Image (cartoon, helix red, strand yellow):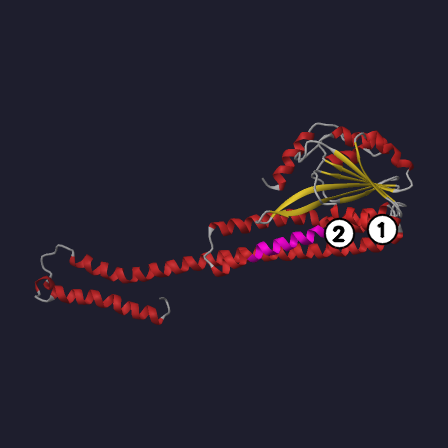
Amino acid sequence: MNLVKKSRRHASRKTGLAPGSLVHVGDVLVESTSISVIDYNKDTVRETTVTSIDELQSLRSADTVTWVIVEGLANVAVVEKIGEMFGIHQLVLEDILNTHQRPKFEEYDDYLYIVLKGMIAVGEQFTVDYEQISLLVLDNVVFAFKEKKDDLFAPVIQRIRTSKGRFRSLGADFLTYSILDGIIDMNFVLIDSLDESITVLEDQLLEGEPSKATLNSIQRLKREIVGVRRYVSPIRELINEMLRSESRLIDEKTHIYLRDVSDHAIRIIESIELHRDIISGLLDIYISSVSNRMNEVMKVLTVFASIFIPLTFLTGIYGMNFEYMPELHWRWAYPALWVFFLSIPSVLLVYFKRKNWL
């Protein structure tokens, strides 16, 4: 089922509900919701797993940067409780639970809201696994809401653990940049996988006979690229809005890092557009290959038709039951006709070879 159909099917769950109604919209990737906290400053790093949401209340007065990772969105009560505890608007919570959001950046008085897609290529064939990531940026606190448990944040977590000072001495805005940078850079791995799949298809088209399976692979890649482009294209505008923001939660020193992320996003968008053009070219090659193969078949059929049409004409004439046909009484008429029959294909075959039809 494609992305548009899935989005329509899940969106129907909110039909008739009031704005801000908290309903999880999307596939349930994990049944339970887990919350982990990474608390750090220049000197220390502390990682804990939260069993009760009330434990998060102490984050407001902490003198460290705190990263709260919420994995699994099926439990609506968890998201609702966090919203009440930290004063998050009901419409923002609604967007967090709706996993078919377009990447965007929203600025509020006391916090920032960022949503984008994490994309990973899975399987031997190019198939994209999507996961919505929602970020809430507050004073020294960053909430990350994910649809499932995976290693998407592993590089950023490792940087926090091994940092010698610079990373851990910067604020929540730098942590937000690092998360965005890690998610966006995963798209380079995605493009490498896409490039390998396209290379395989090119080899099949240029070296072998194109088949229905080849056409299906081209169409599947085309649909996947459309989905990737849908969630990659808005990222550049998302970063630009963050750069234009005058919020106190984004330090001016972080702008240089955000511009670097914007450059990465532009490179990814250009690569996606390039690969989309390549896929369209592969479809044209497939159609040309099928047309050429059809032309070869028609050429062979034309050769046989050219040979048998005059023979059929002659047999039709001498198959008529007229009484006064002089040739029927000639002694050598039958052998002569056979000689004529055999000479027609020979002459035509020589002609076709000279025209390079055979």
Instruction: Write the residue at 58% across / 39% down.
Output: 1
For the residues bearing labels 1 and 2, Cβ distance under 8 angstroms:
no
Label 2 crowd bin: few (<14), some (14–19), many (20+), radius 10 Å: many
Residue furthest bottom as drawn: 354
Nearest the viewer among 312 and 170 is 170
Q: Is residue 262 left or right of residue 212?
A: right
Q: Which residue is mark 1?
A: 167
* Prevalent SS, magenta region: helix
SS at mark 1 in the image: helix
Instruction: Write the residue at 89% across / 36% down.
Output: 60
Q: Where does residue 220 sit, x and y in percent of width and height? A: 56, 48
Nearest the viewer among 150 and 109 is 150
Q: Is residue 288 left or right of residue 191?
A: left
Task: Say the numbered circle drawn on residue 110.
Answer: none
- Compared with 246, 99 (above or below) is above
* Residue 22 visible here: no
Q: Where does residue 4 sit, x and y in percent of width and height? A: 63, 40
**Type of amino acid at the residue the image marks with label 2:** Arg
**Type of amino acid at the residue the image marks with label 1:** Phe
SS at mark 2 in the image: helix
* Residue 288 visible here: yes
Number of callouts: 2
Q: Is residue 60 left or right of residue 258?
A: right
Instruction: Write the residue at 32% across / 62% down.
Output: 303
Q: Which residue is mark 2?
A: 236
- Compared with 91, 120 (above or below) is below
In magenta segment, residue 201: no
- The mark closer to the camera, 1 or 2, is 1
1 or 2: tag closer to the N-terminus = 1
Label 1 crowd bin: few (<14), some (14–19), many (20+), radius 10 Å: some
Nearest the viewer among 298 and 171 is 171
